[in-house]
């Protein structure tokens, strides 16, 4: 007999005369809460009287003591009462007033021994012990299957209240579904008849016992935070987006390919990569990095940190609106700092390429791999080899960047959806990216309605309207140079930034286009060569066939373009950037043997979840976020 058949035969009890039994979860003898609350059009009438088993964690609780009449006097005459019927007034005084009692004992008397015995046998010893306190416990239970919680009523005769009340307690209970005795926000409740399991909580150490723990504090307890309603809702939305991603590519005849996590190739060319090694040589690494990242006494990392601080100053001055001259000076200073960072980055890319060549020639004989290996920053180069055989392929997995920048849009480990299509050019890639983006937005609205209602209530009240607008409008498509012109014409009345001929678009510029100017998604294409990876196809005007899809509130969410299929052009790009040629020979082989025009893109999946839910920090949508100096479990 199958497990499912066994489960169906485990009927906890009878049901109402007109109701259909609820189906249990296939792999345990319990009913998920979502089957009680979602898609109910009958007012829960058919559920009343059904006997079910539910399991979950206590979100909140209260104990109500039952009121009871005073106990009646004992109906049985005790031995004490029989003997005390003839007690005189003097004897009563003896029992009440110690002085008189002591005098009588000294004088003696026929009844003194009996009276002493009377004092040592109080009436309380002959009465039954008081009954234990009787109470009812009301629990709000969640099992993570939906936003809704179920009220569970447990009598103190069924289980000890003190074990059930703490927030976070896990319980498995069996009982009958019923209407609450008083009208309120609960339309149905479970009257518990048996408590099958109790997972107790250490109240002093459990971090969620306090109300509304801020999201940034919850990151220190990533193993507990999915028990909060907000994080659980975000993770259900994330799960739905993951499923929708695979559904989109299945519907469009793509093949799922798993690319390696450990690689010798840097897809971006000059990324900050995590090295994979079984030996440690931290001192040598520090010396190498110090040499690479210092130019004329100026360290790129320090310049970037200064840019972050100056950006915060600009935002503070904007909010104050008290000194426009100070604001203009701060913006000008920030612009110069960003320009310096861009110049240093270009110069150091060439230095890094040369240093990597020298570094890879070191002794690796004692390591697990014979050459330097890293955690991959992108799988698109590896996907190209399968696109050259299968046509249309995609990969979905974690990618890694050893970037110390404290950004709300960046983490050390982030999940990416990467796509490669043979016989496809720039516009094909842009169309596919836009279709995928809209598909995911529509999927969430249609399949996560309850979760999105909660998101709209507790996180971002514009989220549903924003997604509906995304689906109904087409993105603005402009070239990189056109974007610069738009920003110049805007005259930056708010930021007062002047765009010179050498200014490069930053992430803030791109976000400004989507948030303030067009107020919808923007696709920007035809970038300068040094702004994109080495493998992007070079256009006749010396720009490259790359694009970014920029969305309001988040910024760049998809990047892609047409890849260079011409051997001579990409070979010269590798040489010009001083990349270690031997590491890219396999990639160049794809151009030597059966080359084809092809294009693709990368969707930053975590940023997609961030956009959908309206949260502000990407670490809050990643199950176990990893960032600089933060890897707690």
Image: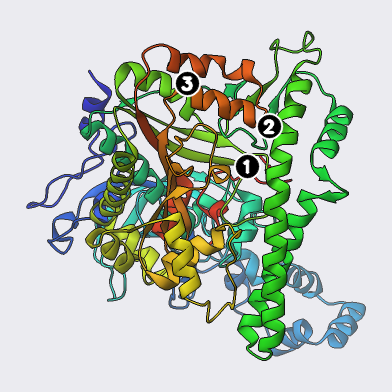
How far separated are the C-alphas under marks 2 and 3? Answer: 29 Å
Q: Nearer the viewer, residue 164 or 328?
A: 328
Q: Nearer the viewer, residue 118 or 133?
A: 133
Q: Is residue 409 visible?
A: yes
The quadrant where residue 450 appears? bottom left
Q: Earlier in the sequence, mark 2 or mark 3?
A: 2
Q: Secondary structure at mark 1?
A: loop
Residue at (80, 37) in percent of width and height: 292
* Residue 94, x across and y down, in percent: 78, 84
Marker disc for residue 412? 1
The answer to whether residue 403 is above or below residue 289 is below
Residue placed furthest toward the right: 106
Q: Earlier in the sequence, mark 1 or mark 2?
A: 2
How far separated are the C-alphas under marks 3 and 1? Answer: 33 Å
Looking at the image, residue 355 sits to the left or right of residue 276; the answer is right
Residue named by callout 3? 567
* Residue 166, x across and y down, in percent: 56, 58
Q: Secondary structure at mark 3?
A: helix
**Marks 3 and 1 in Cβ contact (< 8 Å):** no
Q: Residues within 10 Å of mark 2 (few under 14, many from 20)?
A: some
**Marks 1 and 2 in Cβ contact (< 8 Å):** yes
Looking at the image, residue 413 sits to the left or right of residue 185; the answer is right
Q: Secondary structure at mark 2?
A: loop
């Amino acid at each position: 007999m199958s497990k499912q058949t066994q489960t169906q035969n485990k009927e906890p009890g009878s049901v109402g005369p007109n109701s259909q039994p609820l189906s249990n979860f296939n792999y345990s003898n319990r009913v998920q809460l979502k089957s009680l609350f979602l898609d109910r059009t009958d007012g829960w009438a058919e559920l009343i009287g059904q006997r079910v088993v539910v399991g979950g964690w206590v979100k909140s609780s209260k104990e109500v003591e039952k009121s009871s009449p005073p106990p009646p006097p004992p109906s049985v005459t005790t031995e004490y009462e029989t003997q005390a019927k003839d007690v005189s007034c003097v004897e009563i005084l003896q029992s009440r007033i110690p002085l008189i009692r002591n005098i009588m004992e000294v004088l003696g008397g026929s009844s003194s021994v009996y009276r002493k015995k009377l004092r040592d046998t109080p009436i309380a010893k002959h009465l039954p012990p008081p009954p234990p306190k009787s109470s009812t416990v009301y629990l709000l239970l969640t099992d993570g299957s939906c936003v809704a919680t179920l009220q569970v009523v447990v009598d103190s005769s069924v289980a000890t209240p003190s074990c059930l009340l703490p927030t976070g307690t896990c319980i498995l209970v069996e009982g009958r579904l019923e209407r609450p005795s008083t009208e309120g926000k609960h339309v149905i409740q479970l009257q518990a008849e048996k408590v099958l399991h109790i997972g107790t909580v250490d109240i002093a150490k459990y971090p969620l016992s306090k109300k509304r723990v801020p999201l940034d504090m919850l990151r220190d307890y990533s193993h507990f935070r999915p028990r909060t309603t907000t994080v659980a809702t975000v993770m259900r939305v994330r799960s739905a987006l993951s499923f929708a991603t695979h559904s989109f590519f299945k519907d469009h005849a793509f093949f799922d390919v798993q690319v390696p996590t450990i690689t010798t190739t840097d897809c971006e060319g000059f990324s900050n990569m995590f090295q994979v090694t079984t030996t440690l040589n931290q001192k040598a690494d520090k010396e190498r990095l110090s040499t690479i990242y210092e130019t004329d006494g100026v360290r790129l990392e320090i310049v970037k940190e200064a840019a972050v601080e100056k950006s915060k100053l600009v935002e503070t001055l904007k909010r104050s609106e008290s000194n426009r001259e100070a604001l203009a000076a701060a913006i000008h200073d920030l612009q110069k700092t960003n320009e310096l960072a861009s110049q240093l980055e270009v110069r150091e890319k060439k230095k890094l390429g040369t240093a990597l060549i020298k570094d890879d020639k070191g002794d690796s004989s004692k390591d697990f791999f014979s050459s330097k290996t890293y955690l991959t920053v992108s799988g698109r180069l590896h996907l190209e080899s399968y696109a050259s055989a299968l046509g249309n392929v995609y990969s979905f997995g974690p990618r890694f960047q050893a970037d110390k920048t404290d950004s709300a849009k960046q983490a050390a480990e982030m999940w990416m959806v990467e796509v490669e299509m043979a016989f496809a050019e720039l516009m094909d890639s842009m169309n596919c990216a836009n279709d995928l983006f809209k598909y995911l937005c529509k999927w969430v609205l249609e399949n996560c309605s309850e979760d999105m209602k909660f998101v709209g209530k507790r996180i971002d009240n514009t989220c549903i309207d924003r997604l509906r607008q995304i689906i109904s409008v087409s993105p603005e498509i402009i070239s990189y140079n056109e974007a610069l012109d738009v920003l110049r014409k805007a005259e930056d009345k708010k930021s007062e930034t002047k765009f010179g001929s050498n200014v490069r678009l930053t992430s803030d510029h791109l976000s400004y286009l989507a948030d303030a100017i067009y107020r919808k998604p923007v696709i920007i294409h035809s970038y300068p060569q040094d702004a994109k990876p080495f493998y992007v196809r070079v256009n006749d005007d010396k720009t490259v066939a790359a694009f970014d899809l920029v969305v309001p509130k988040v910024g760049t969410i998809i990047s892609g373009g047409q890849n260079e299929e011409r051997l001579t052009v990409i070979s010269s790009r590798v040489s010009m950037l001083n990349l270690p040629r031997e590491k890219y020979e396999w990639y160049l082989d794809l151009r030597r043997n059966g080359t084809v025009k092809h294009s693709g893109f990368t969707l930053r999946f975590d940023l997609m979840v961030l956009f959908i839910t309206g949260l502000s920090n990407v670490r809050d949508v990643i199950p176990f976020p990893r960032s600089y100096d933060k890897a707690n479990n």
